[in-house]
Image: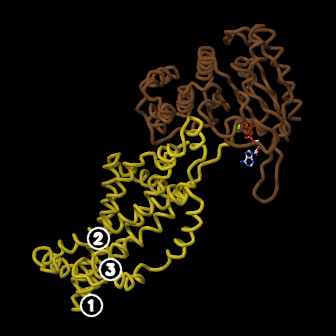
Chain colours: A brown, B yellow
Amino acid sequence: MNESKLAKAADTGLRLQGISHSFSDGRGRATDVLAGVSFEVGAREFVSLMGPSGCGKSTVLGMVAGFLSPEQGDVRWHGERVTAPDAARGVVFQKPHLYPWCEVYDNVMFGPRALGRERESRDLARDLIAEVGLEGFERHRPYELSGGMQHRVALARTLVNRPELLLMDEPFAALDAQTREEMQALLLEVWQRHRCTVLFVTHDIEEGLLLSDRILVMGHRPGSIRADISVDFERPRDETLVFDQRFVDLRSSVRTLFRKDSS
Amino acid sequence: MTDLPSATPDAALEQVDSELVRGHRLSRKRRLLPTGRWGDFIATTASLITALALVVALWWIAAIAFNDPNVLPSPEEVADRADELLTNGGDLGLVHNAQVSLIRILIGWGGGVIAGVAVGIAMVSNRWILGLLDPLIELGRPIPPLAFAPLLVIWFGIGELPKYMILGFTTFPIVAISTVAAVKGVDRNWILAAQSLGAGRLYVLRRVTIPAALPGILVSIRLANGLSWSSLVAAEIIASTSGLGWMILQAGRFLDTPTIFVGIITIGLLAFITDRVLRVAEAWLVPWRGKGAS
Ligand SMILES: Nc1ncnc2c1ncn2[C@@H]1O[C@H](COP(=O)(O)OP(=O)(O)OP(=O)(O)O)[C@@H](O)[C@H]1O
Ligand SMILES: [Mg+2]
């Protein structure tokens, strides 16, 4: 425990500093979306970003991914300023965004092929397709799959690249309870095996508590970090954690934070 | 990142298309025809035959009423002439002239398609090219290709080239403009996903942008094919000695009304058949079209 904390201090993987941003509506009116968002995520840490709808979680994630630049402040990954998307920072979007002109297998192999790593990624691609429960669907097109299945393909497509930083935007929100639990377990396993850093956006307090080392609670209009809560239940964790008294307490205090913010 | 809904320019068209298909499906179910592609085929053919029978019947009645084959020959007279032109027509031989025209269309339209797609992609890839060509294409587009005919003869003589060019001029702007619109309408999230999966500019273009824009581009290619057939006569006004357009013009000079009709019907038929072929190609190339991709 102590050791890992030291490691965190030594290598701050991701650092956001004083991020402010506004979107203009094209008619000269600007809405401040983010105001002074700063936080750090240590290497190999699992951090959840939570907050009410529209508070700017996806916007923050998009900045870390390199999809848009903040008007003020900067995003640094291993000390380097993020300016463009990169395979080291994998993204699982709120929607699957699969390529309908590719079969499932080719969607998963998109990254390896783009990176010229096709040969050494084939086995991993097959394994991941099996792990997300889609064995036998390799030759299907995305539109032949259910929404939940598409989300699972999207997860495999991102994981096959073995990103150092995994950015996930409510990846399991569209799944049924059973599949969601399976995917959460899979994610934890991948994370533990492969030791990547995860920034995970979710609406679901329980999900955040179950998965993360830390929870960042964002507030509304303009968005900023209201609370940084450490979640230090021992790992590996499983669903029985929800009956733990400490879990119940933590959940209700986060919930209170949420309520305070939306009122 | 917010998820913007994909707004392809041909989305509206696809909507109409899928609405039609859906309507089709319903009526097909009601009639208990076989499902699948064959069911569609049978239903389309049936409605086509009905429509044709109706037109021929009205035509026949009108021909009898006029009672002057030089003004309006009856379907029978036109069929006789078609038969004659199919078996032996010399210069006026139908097969020969249809072949000549078909080849002209394929070359002129095909060239226009290739140029249109290439220029369209160049336009969206480079701001300067877009700024330069966009107004030029927009200015040139409303000018009927026929207006270029005399110039083209002066510049390029009376060979095949000016004919290809007229057909190419018909095709090029539609395909170029549609390509630009289709590429611009590609869902940004598809591109962002590709970039964060490690794809570079060229890889994104080849593996995401072009396939994503393909449905829109293919629609314009098909529309341009129809328009090429409708400028065929214009192309073949230029010092021709063959082709369906020439055949019609020539027959007009001799008041040979039945041959005019044969020419018109043949053009219509060939345009229809090429359109069908392109539709099949479309369904094969973009099977995901209108399948609610996300
Ligand atoms: N491209 C854009 N143009 C204008 N406004 C935008 C744009 N993207 C986001 N916004 C605005 O920024 C705010 C934050 O959006 P964002 O998508 O980051 O919220 P979110 O926290 O992810 O919400 P949700 O939980 O519903 O996904 C919203 O109020 C939204 O209206
Ligand atoms: Mg969001």
- x then y, percent, for residue B47: 34, 62
**Would you say A120 lies left or right of A224 here?**
left
Which label lies toward us, 3 or 2?
2
- The quarter of the picture where residue A14 lies is top right
Q: Residues within 10 Å of mark 3 (few under 14, many from 20)?
A: many
Which three-letter amino acid code belongs to the residue tagged 3? Val
Q: Mark 1 points at which residue?
A: B71
- Vertical position of residue A45 compared to residue B273: above or below: above
Q: Name the residue under label 2.
A: B104
- Give the SS element for disc 1: loop
User: Ligand 1: does it lie within 8 Å of the C-beta at label 2?
Assistant: no
What chain does badge 3 belong to? B
Q: In which quarter of the image is the C terminus of chain A?
A: top right
Q: Mark 3 points at which residue?
A: B233
Which three-letter amino acid code belongs to the residue tagged 1? Val
Which three-letter amino acid code belongs to the residue tagged 2? Arg
> Residue shown at 42%/72% (left/top)?
B170
